[in-house]
Image: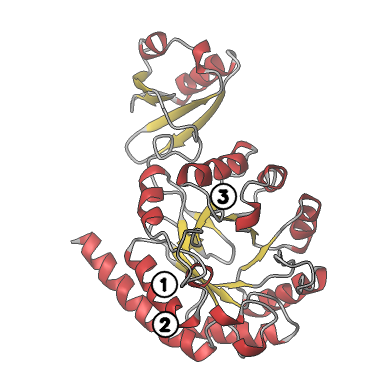
Amino acid sequence: MIAIVKPQATQEQLRHLIAWIESRGLQTYVSKGDNETIVGLVGDTTAVDPFLLESMDIIDRVTRVSEPFKLANRKFHPEDTVIDCGFGVKIGGGHFQVIAGPCSVEGEQLIDVARQVKDAGATMLRGGAFKPRTSPYANQGMGKDGLKILCEAKDELHMPIVSEVMDPRDVQLFEDLGIDVMQIGARNMQNFNLLKEVGKTKTPVLLKRGLSATIDEFLMAAEYVMSEGNENVILCERGIRTFETRTRNTFDTNAIAVCHHLSHLPIVGDPSHATGYTRYVVAAALAATAAGADGLEIEVHPEPSHAWSDGAQALTPVQFRNAMRRIELVRSAVVMEDES
């Protein structure tokens, strides 16, 4: 349930309203926009009579929210959320960012890759230190040492870093080392203990859609994080599993538009995991950009044939630079069209 507050309401009236609602066992979330203030009611809303609420002098109108995701819902927060990822790099609400780097941190070469992707226009650096692999015999990543190398690159280039956390017990390690964005991988989208743990922090979370998750399930996973107090959630469409076998996954660009309609959270596209093949990555990146994504996550490796993981879908630094030129052209056209 949401209550739209009248523009002339005072702060004191608003405080009294919130106290009255919370005295009935509900949580409140206040969203102040340019034109109106919305108070979201979360919990057993049967404890509040909507007609009584609407009769109050301070209230303009009351609306029920039918979707199970409340905090991630655009009805609760009509304006786009803008998330500060560090070093002044913001995403959402018109701020477009490109996250680039290798699938796995493989050593000090990461810093050279970081220099190259930043020079090409990337604004955030990605790299996996803990790697979820289908086979227990595949490389599992460098762990803490990999995170430290990411931090070296961050300190040199003043570039926010993104890395995947897999275990609730490692969240504090990520916090202590100052990882700017904690990524939740597709296989962990419904690891509810992990979602709750990152939700207890204020660190931005890049949440990837599960392999076969519906959009509602995807948004409910975001809700888990937000329900613990962390509102800094970035959605990531990375392709879903279908009957198609010619690509690694099926890139659901529909989800970008649908998520923007349903939610105020920023959403990025991951064309690398979606397609699984270098030859298709740029086309999928352009499609996501045209669909209105708030950013992209692209894998880049200096020698894809020697990569520890996912070399088949990585761009070389030269290919990435060329892709960035095309992405900027598409983005310029989309932004100009929106403004007109």
Q: Decide: is 129 above or below 222.
A: below
Pick the front one: 322 or 303: 303
Q: CA distance from mark 3 to mark 2?
A: 28 Å
In the rendered image, which residue does mark 2 sit on?
Answer: 323
Percent position of residue 163, x then y: 67, 65
In the rendered image, which residue does mark 3 sit on?
Answer: 232
SS label for mark 3: loop
Q: Quadrant of residue 290?
A: bottom left
In the rendered image, which residue does mark 1 sit on?
Answer: 285
Residue ID at (42%, 82%): 323
Q: Quadrant of residue 254?
A: bottom left
Name the amino acid type tagged 2: Ala
Contact? badges 2 and 1 (CB < 8 Å): yes
Q: Is residue 243 left or right of residue 111?
A: left
Name the amino acid type tagged 1: Ala
Residue ID at (36%, 23%): 63
Q: Quadrant of residue 230?
A: top right
SS label for mark 1: helix
Question: What is the crowding at mark 1: few (fewer than 14 residues within 10 Å), some, or many (at least 20)?
Answer: many
Percent position of residue 35, x then y: 32, 37
Decide which of tag 2 and tag 1 comes sooner along the chain.
1
Percent position of residue 110, x then y: 68, 82
Decide which of tag 3 and tag 2 comes sooner along the chain.
3
